[in-house]
Amino acid sequence: MRLRMPQVTLNGYSSSYTPGDPLTGFGVAKVLDSGHPDYKAGDLVWGITGWEEYSLITPTEGLTSLEQGLKKIQHTDVPLSYHTGLLGMPGMTAYAGFYELCSPKKGEYVFVSAASGAVGQLVGQFAKLLGCYVVGSAGSKEKVDLLKNKLGNDDAFNYKEEHDLDAALKRYFPEGIDIYFDNVGGKTLDAVLLNMRVHGRIAVCGMISQYNVHQQPEGVQNLTCLLFKRIHMVGFSVLDHHQLYPKFIETVLPYIKEGKIVYVEDMAEGLESGPAALVGLFSGRNVGKKVVVVARE
């Protein structure tokens, strides 16, 4: 959402918001009335929704693609909010980025930044289920404790307390990093490059440290490591992997029902709390996936 707020957005990502129109983002909604044969009153859907209590979907708006449309919710035996996170866009992002782009193997060393967030908390759990060694970074003691005690990371650290990220990574990964799932960019990415193993993989999911940098963004100095260590580093968008959704659901639902995956949500009540909830993401106020509850019914 933050990336859609400048007047000019990056080509290939998404269009800018229109001033005066409601913001849009991934959400869950209930169909009240429908003239579309595939949707009837009472159906629950998830996808791109407006930050508003009622929305009108016109015939020109796609109803099938992950990017623009709404997917019917088939599984109502899990919390509906999961379709904004674990079973929605963040879950798909973690699944596609980790399994498809990082080609993980049992026993590999995995580092996840913003590891307690909507996407990061799942990447760490996917890696542990595969038999990897996982370390996550976060921005508070509470989040570090969450990573180690609830989300199953082998270890975790508060990046705000580390004055030398390179030294910190060498401490946690004395043999180097095979896979880095990057949610933050900036100085963390630069330090990780120095600590990657030969033929390592980096999935660039986000760069939240740079989204509010109004002057010169932080440069990455250690790109020569890509060459010398033959590192595969790729940026991606979940929108390019919507065809994986059935496979993703087939994989994740049993994990949820068997208690092998947990998902931490941070609820804000009422649409009026939305702006503060969104802004709070950039100072790390959320613990887990931030969800705005528009209505309980």
Image: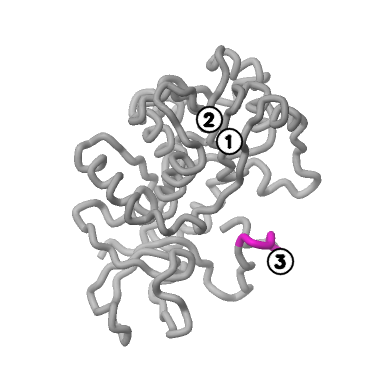
Is any atom of residue 137 visible in this view?
A: no
Q: Amino acid at mark 3?
A: Gln
Q: Amino acid at mark 1?
A: Ile
The residue stretch that appears in magenta: 7-13
- The label on residue 191 is none
**Residue at 58% across / 28% down in the picture?**
200
**Residue at 64% across / 38% down in the picture?**
185
Q: Quadrant of the N terminus?
A: bottom right
Q: Which residue is mark 2?
A: 179
Q: Mark 2: which secondary structure?
A: strand
In the rendered image, the vertical position of residue 268 relative to residue 259, given as above or below: below
**Residue at 26% across / 34% down in the picture?**
260
Q: Position of residue 250 (x, y in %)?
A: 27, 49
Is any atom of residue 189 visible in this view?
A: yes
Q: Which residue is mark 1?
A: 202
Q: Position of residue 5 (x, y in %)?
A: 64, 62
Q: Position of residue 36 (x, y in %)?
A: 32, 84
Q: Which residue is mark 3?
A: 7
